[in-house]
Amino acid sequence: MGLSGRTFLGLTASDLADLVFSALIIAAGYFLARVLVNTILKRIAARTSTKLDDEILKQISRELRWLVTLLFANFAISGLAFINDIARTVINDIVFLLGLVILTSMTLGLIQAAASHYKASLQTKEDQDRLDPVITAVQRFAEFIILLLALSFGLAHFGANANALYFTILVAAVLASLAARDIIADAISGFIILIDQPLRVGDSVLITEMDTWGDVLDIGTRTTRIRTVDNREIIVPNSQVAKAKIVNYNLPDTNYRMQSDIGVAYGIDF
């Protein structure tokens, strides 16, 4: 009867040969993925003048290797004729979930690389510290959107209705915005102040509407702290600072002119 008629674990010799061949394809895919990422792409990135591609490759190199390997594995498994429909469906679902996790992780890595590159491109350490809350907030919002999209794709793949999830998030966002309206307004104003820079830490400013004169100690996410000339600290909500008329005595430089009108009566002998 020969080897063709023998079975091992319910698999014929032909099935075992296909299984070994598929394993070799997966191993080859993993080897090619390492060569692609660790050699070819690194050499290409090293030849460019910008550092952004190096940072991106550093962030997503591991995920990119596993993604290429997963594609080879999916191709190899799809060629196994002895797998029944139920097992094939389960395998396809596993491949989809792994691919979704890898792509999500890659996207989050791209966001991290972009944020780090933009922060490093700022000219001074002061600018980096000043804009760090803004960069972090934008990064976290982008990561939240990506995770929400990944969850939506996952639910849609398995036939689940994501409308309830969207409605719950929408209601929670509306309730949170109503409950923390002033806090949100102060936070947004703080981001605008940090980006537009009408005042900076160390500047001597006069806020005309509040009749507040002093040196800026700190510009936070929600409030701005000013030390007055009589050595008192005033904590001003950023929403009020954003709407106020500000005289900054450090811009464009520290030299400025002061004018005083002095009235003198007629007939006075100088």
Image: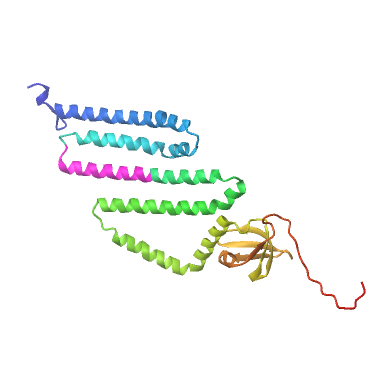
Q: Which residue lies furthest to the front in this view?
A: 266
- Quadrant for the N terminus in the image: top left
Left or right: residue 126 versus residue 75 is: right
Q: Is residue 170 magenta?
A: no
Left or right: residue 155 versus residue 257 is: left
Left or right: residue 204 versus residue 156 is: right
**In the rendering, at what x and y percent does residue 217 appear?**
66, 58
The answer to whether residue 248 shows anywhere in this view is yes
Residue 75 vs 122, above or below: the answer is above
At 33% from the left and 52% from the top, the residue drawn is 151
Q: Residue furthest bottom?
A: 266
Q: Is residue 86 magenta?
A: yes
**Quadrant of the rendered image containing residue 107:** top left
Between 51 and 183, the one lying in front of the other is 51
Residue 269 vs 142, above or below: the answer is below
Q: Give the range drawn in magenta.
A: 83-105
Q: Residue furthest left?
A: 1
At 11% from the left and 26% from the top, the residue drawn is 6
Left or right: residue 28 versus residue 172 is: left
At 51% from the left and 61% from the top, the residue drawn is 188
**In the rendering, at what x and y percent does residue 41 appear?**
41, 32
The answer to whether residue 221 shows anywhere in this view is no
Looking at the picture, the colour scheme in use is rainbow
- Quadrant for the C terminus in the image: bottom right
Residue 38 vs 147, above or below: the answer is above
**Quadrant of the rendered image containing residue 17:** top left
Instruction: Characterize the magenta stretch by its predominant secondary structure.
Output: helix
At 31% from the left and 54% from the top, the residue drawn is 152
**In the rendering, at what x and y percent does residue 47 appear?**
47, 30
